[in-house]
Image: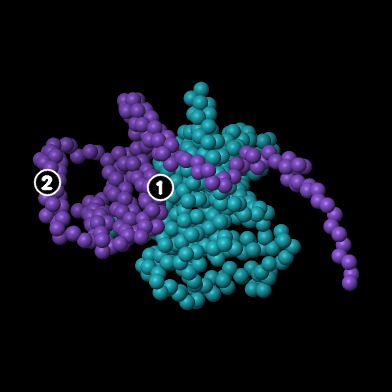
Chain colours: A purple, B cyan
Amino acid sequence: MTFEKFLFYVFSAILVFAATMVITRRNPVHSALFLVLAFFTSSILWMLLEAEFLAIVLVLVYVGAVMVLFLFVVMMLDIDQAAMRAGFIKMLPVGLLVAGIMAVEMFLVVGPKYFGLDKYAMPAPHPADYSNTEELGNVLYTIYMYPVEIASVILLVGIIAAIGLTLRRRPDNKRIDPALQVQVKKGPDRIRVVKMPAEKKMEAK
Amino acid sequence: MDAFLDILWILIKIVAIVLPLMLCVAYYTLAERKVISYMQVRIGPNRVGPRGSLQPIADAVKLMFKEIILPTNANKTLFILAPMLSIGPALAAWAVFPFSEDLVLADINAGLLYLLALTSVGVYGVIIAGWASNSKYAFLSAIRCGAQIVAYEIAMGFALVVVLIAAGSLNLGDIVQAQAGSWGFLNWFWIPLLPIFVIYFVSGVAETNRAPFDVAEGESEIVAGFHVEYSGMTFAVFFLAEYANMILISALTAIMFMGGWLSPFHGIPLLGTLFDLVPGFIWLLLKTLVVAFLFLWFRATFPRYRYDQIMRLGWKVFIPITIVWIVLAGFFVAV
């Protein structure tokens, strides 16, 4: 067994363990953290496939951004565990049925008869100066130019829609406008001199 | 057997990087206290060793022998795990850092991307610490800190994209080489990318939760921040992580915008040939120290930002400017 193969089995075992923990832990924060571990190990598996760009971007995007926001929400939740567990036995047959169908379907599509060394030749390892990033860039911005551009426009529309849905001005909101704040003049804007009649001095008794 | 020797050799190299780094962190804390003292017309630590020079050692010994208190309602595993998660990325980032032309632990193609990924992972230590402590103050601070880091990470990432467009490479060594030229320090990226240089450094200050962006440790509002419940060595590890991150940001600023190990006088007659004899590592060290000093200077000078202003600066000022500069840089590179 080569060293790479050994690493593959070690990290695959960690990945499967982490993925199981995600769905079995009672505490949602623990589940989210095990999901982070799962992302990390799968990124290492991609690294073993010499896809270093995808591996690092997986960590950057999913671990560094998506899961942080996820964790934020999960931490502030107050989930009633008992209510979540209720009806587990009743739902179990349906769940097992769906899981079984999905497993069979996946086996049909990605079964061993489509893969293996007799179907595809063993890919030769790339030399040390091979840049996965450059290869990917060359392909993405030439052959797959339109799909990339269309996907990015769809994402942009998604961003605008998300902001548009949450953007609302409440009338009682005392928000501060920095543009107005910096325009304040030294004289009349800051101090208001109020004229008042002079008060009478108290007479000593 | 060969594989084993390789791993041993790599381990030796890692120790050779981490040990001096830890020493630097220890003395950076002393430098901070001294520099701020002199700026505030005080003397600062002056009891342990000559002129207080052994103060960090005394602090380290004290923290090591203090009891680690586990709060009763804390989540024990995560409580202990959090400091480790915060120092891990801070140290791992140094793996791709080029100390001179050929002195780098892992000379990988996607070095910049790796750095970006690791700095984004650093936020977990803080968030988990805040949650696992089971304390209101720690949790509030973790949320403040998390939101701030996520916001400034984007500006920082975009600033690095501009650098990568200008240099045409993700490899840190190649980025330094792209700044070499016959004009000495006028060739470095800080002139063509001046706004990006400023944005990168200010985002770096915000990313490390340093003054004036240190709302995560607002003493007057939330006691001490996400590490209120930590004591002894667990607290010290958070401290080490913060200072290691500051040194990392300083060193990266030196690499990305100030020519890394290049001599500033290269190409200037007489002066250039004289200073080319100085080893590149010395130049890198000097540049890093200058930027690291700025961190301390900021802390002694600026009052703390208000939280909504921090968010406004990150999202509404820095990110739009960096996006404009990405377009501009792309245009200039293409022409």
Residue at position x 42%, y 62% in the image: B131
| Discs 2, 1: same chain | yes
Judge whether residue A194 can be spotted in this image.
yes
Furthest residue in direction top, as rendered: B335
Residues B257 and A152: in front is: A152
The amino acid at mark 2 is Ile
Residues B283 and A139: in front is: A139
Residue A101 disc label? 2
Residue at position x 67%, y 74% in the image: B47
Residue at position x 59%, y 33% in the image: B192
Residues B7 and B286: in front is: B286
- Residue where numbered disc 1 is placed: A65
Locate residue B159 relative to residue A44 in the image: left or right: right
Could you say where residue A146 lies in the image, as x and y percent from the top left? 33, 25
Can you tell which of label 2 and label 1 is closer to the viewer?
2
The amino acid at mark 1 is Ala
Residue at position x 44%, y 46% in the image: B116
User: Does B211 sit above or below residue B199?
Assistant: below
Could you say where residue A59 lies in the image, as x and y percent from the top left? 37, 48
Residue B335 disc label? none
Furthest residue in direction right, as rendered: A204
The chain that hosts pointer 2 is A
The chain that hosts pointer 1 is A
Judge whether residue B27 can be spotted in this image.
no
Helix, strand or loop at label 1? It is helix
Could you say where residue B163 lies in the image, as x and y percent from the top left? 51, 37
**Quarter assignment of residue B189:** top right
- The first of marks 2 and 1 along the sequence is 1
